[in-house]
Image: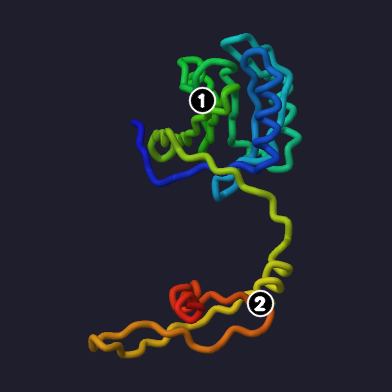
Amino acid sequence: MKVKQNLRVRIDADAMERIWHWTDLAAGEFSCLGTVTDDITVSNVQLFDQICTAASTELDQDALAKFLVTHAQPEHVRAWIHSHGRLGVFWSQQDEACIEGLANDQCLVSIVVNKKREFKARIDVWQPFRLTFDDLPLEIRLPDQNLRGECERLFNAHVVEMQPVLMPDWRGGRHPQQQGQPQHGQAYRGGWPDFDDDLADWR
């Protein structure tokens, strides 16, 4: 059964860049694995020994087993990414068989890409029910540059947020007026100046 929900897959910018480089370098297909966090973010993509053709990719099982055995958290290796080269992005019968072969007690994130920078993403689960969430959005997660403190300092130095005060108008209703005046060096967010009045004074 295939179900579409409000799910999305995220991927680290570093991982996405590596995938695009490998896609460009490969004449046909290639595949790699990555880790998946609890918020469904793919990272730490890894290449393994593999045999690839224009329409297939086969990982070396010994290299894969060694990687999983020595990995600090093998339970987080839950992403399979592969390229279709110059072909479109879709789930072939071979892809479906590979996904079933990677079945586990949690979930598997699968991503297929091509040289046109097209992609498809899906999530498969096997317990307690067999479900596939297909055609999911793929978002690139930019690295945290630890800019919060600097951004907050600059915001406080340059931005004044003026609170509206409701005042009665001639129609008996209310309209907002800006409360307070902006300080020197701070941005004024009260709207555009009245150019008509300025022109009238000039005339």
- Residue at horizontal 63 percent and vertical 37 percent from the top: 77
Q: Residue type at mark 2? A: Asn
Residue 78 in percent (x, y) is at: 59, 36
Q: Nearer the viewer, residue 184 or 80?
A: 184
- Residue at horizontal 54 percent and vertical 78 percent from the top: 161
Q: On screen, 27 above or below 111?
A: above
Horizontally, is 200 left or right of 185 in the view?
left
Could you tell me how far apart the alpha carbons at marks 1 and 2 are, in whole angstroms? Answer: 50 Å
Q: Residue type at mark 1? A: Ile
Res. 76 image quadrant: top right
Residue 49 in percent (x, y) is at: 73, 19
Tell me, for residue 58, which label it has, or none.
none
Q: On screen, 125 above or below 102?
A: below
Contact flag, marks 1 and 2 (Cβ < 8 Å): no
The color scheme shown is rainbow
Give the labeled residue for mark 1.
Answer: 99
Q: Residues within 10 Å of mark 1 (few under 14, many from 20)?
A: some
Res. 54 image quadrant: top right
Q: Nearer the viewer, residue 175 or 103?
A: 175
Mark 2 element type: helix
Mark 1 element type: helix
For the N terminus, give its image quadrant.
Answer: top left
- Residue at horizontal 44 percent and vertical 83 percent from the top: 164
